[in-house]
Structure formats: structure tokens, C-alpha cells
Image (cartoon, helix red, strand yellow):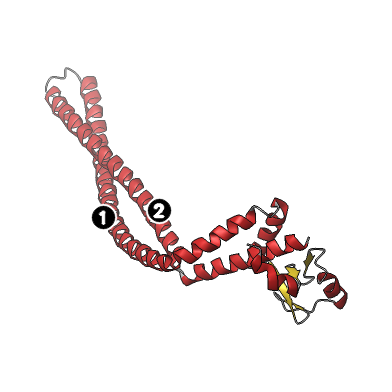
């Protein structure tokens, strides 16, 4: 059990160091991811707008072709007016001409609406592409800055990651899962030492009896207040030698 505690506490120390290195990068990683997500969303918008524009222009062109065809029919109807033989034929022809006129008016309105929709979509595409260009430039700047920061800490980070990998081979999966669960819930601090008889995480006093048991290093104890795993001074002082 003592060895298990040493491994877990050593893992916590390594993760603390990795967290500190990550903090040196500030908000750059989060800002970079946010920009990447925004740019991807804008590209999706452009694709959608492009489809809308093409569809609207297609509808406009189809309406235009139909209008031309209907106007040709109207010219034929007008010529036929002089050839009708009775009122019934004249009335039927007049109805066709009225219907054709109404259809042309409807298509002209649809054509105008499609044109407006297409132009609006094209304008939005240009605006969105301009926004993508600006954000891409900003993303490149942030990536360059992040790479510069990461380069300064690369060797140290690799050292800690290598040590972490070695430790993981010595820690049981169930213990690791418990550690990761607490670490996630407690902002990275899953295992803390006892300091002056108190939990090193929440600083609440540890009962005297539990302190005595804790120093025996025979069992995993969790703080009654914050739920973190607490270890003895001995474990905390010597754990760095286990990696």
C-alpha cells in the first residue's frame, strides 16, 4: 500500500508540474481552439450561403426562361384573336391570355425575389470570407506565439511526460481512474499531503486518530470535507524518488 501511495503522489506532483507549464501558455490554447472552431463554423456558413445563392440564381434563370416561353405564347394568342370563328372560341382564348398574363406577373415577382435573395447571399459570402481571412490571420499569429512559448518548455514538458508514462505502468487502472476522477472534480488536485494536522487541499483539520492511521501508510484515506486523497508527510517527502 505504501508503494501505491508513493506512486499516486508522485503522479500528482508530475501533473502539478505539467499544469504549471500549461499555465505559462495562458489563454493561448483555449483562444486558438476557439478561433479554429469559429473559422470552421464560418466556412460552413459560406458553403450554405453559396448553395443558397446558386439555387436562387437557378430559380431566377428558370423563371426567366419560362417568362420568355409564355410571352411567345401570348404573341400567338394575339394572332389567333383574328382567326376565331365564334364567341365561345374568343372567350376561351381570352381566358388563356388572362391566365398567361397572370402567370407571367407571378413569375416576374418570383424572379425578382430570387434575384434579391441571390444578391444578398453573395454579399453575405463576401462579408463572411473577409471575416474568415481576418480570423485566420489572427489564428496564425496566436499559433506562432503558442509555438514560441511551447518551444521554451518543450524539454521540461517531455521529461515530465516521460516520467508520467513510467508511473502509469506501475499504477493499477482502478486506482488511476479514481485519481483522475478526483483530479477532475478538484481542479487538478486529487492527492495532497497533511499540513500541520490539516488537509493540504481544503485546510480542514484531520481527526487525531486518522492522523495516526495515516502515518502508517497502510490505507488510502480521503478527506472527510473535500474528498481528496490525503497522504502522510513521509510519503510527500520521499515520493520524488520513485520515478
Reading the image, the residue beneath label 1 is: 126
Residue at (24%, 46%) from the top-left corner? 115
Residue 49's disc is none
Spatial CA distance of label 2 from label 1 is 15 Å
Where residue 157 sits in the image (x, y, percent)? 50, 64
User: Residue 183: where, in percent of width, then height?
Assistant: 65, 64
Vertical arrangement, residue 111 with respect to residue 242, above or below: above
Residue 182 lies, with reference to residue 211, above or below; the image says: above
Label located before the other in sequence (2 or 1): 2
| Residue 156, x across and y down, in percent | 49, 66
Q: Nearer the viewer, residue 66 or 122?
A: 122
Residue 41, numbered circle: 2
In terms of image quadrants, where is residue 67? top left
Residues packed near mark 1 inside 10 Å, few (<14), some (14 to 19) or many (20 plus): few
Identify the element where label 2 is drawn.
helix
Q: Which is in the foreground here, disc 2 or disc 1?
A: 2
Amino acid at each position: 500500500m505504501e508503494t501505491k501511495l508513493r506512486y499516486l503522489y508522485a503522479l500528482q506532483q508530475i501533473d502539478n508540474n505539467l499544469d504549471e507549464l500549461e499555465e505559462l501558455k495562458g489563454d493561448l490554447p483555449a483562444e486558438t481552439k476557439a478561433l479554429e472552431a469559429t473559422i470552421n463554423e464560418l466556412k460552413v456558413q459560406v458553403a450554405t450561403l453559396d448553395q443558397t445563392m446558386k439555387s436562387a440564381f437557378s430559380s431566377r434563370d428558370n423563371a426567366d426562361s419560362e417568362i420568355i416561353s409564355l410571352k411567345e405564347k401570348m404573341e400567338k394568342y394575339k394572332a389567333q384573336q383574328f382567326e376565331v370563328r365564334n364567341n365561345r372560341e374568343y372567350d376561351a382564348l381570352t381566358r388563356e391570355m388572362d391566365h398567361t398574363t397572370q402567370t407571367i406577373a407571378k413569375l416576374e415577382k418570383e424572379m425578382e425575389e430570387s434575384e434579391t435573395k441571390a444578391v444578398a447571399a453573395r454579399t453575405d459570402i463576401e462579408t463572411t470570407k473577409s471575416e474568415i481571412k481576418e480570423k485566420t490571420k489572427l489564428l496564425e499569429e496566436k499559433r506562432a506565439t503558442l509555438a514560441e512559448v511551447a518551444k521554451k518548455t518543450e524539454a521540461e514538458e517531455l521529461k515530465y511526460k516521460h516520467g508520467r508514462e513510467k508511473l502509469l505502468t506501475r499504477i493499477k487502472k482502478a486506482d488511476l481512474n479514481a485519481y483522475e476522477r478526483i483530479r477532475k472534480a478538484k481542479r487538478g488536485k486529487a492527492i495532497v499531503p497533511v499540513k500541520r494536522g490539516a488537509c493540504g487541499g481544503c485546510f480542514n483539520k484531520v481527526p487525531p486518530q486518522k492522523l495516526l492511521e495515516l502515518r502508517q501508510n497502510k490505507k488510502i484515506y480521503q478527506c472527510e470535507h473535500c474528498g481528496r486523497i490525503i497522504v502522510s508527510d513521509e510519503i510527500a517527502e520521499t515520493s520524488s524518488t520513485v520515478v
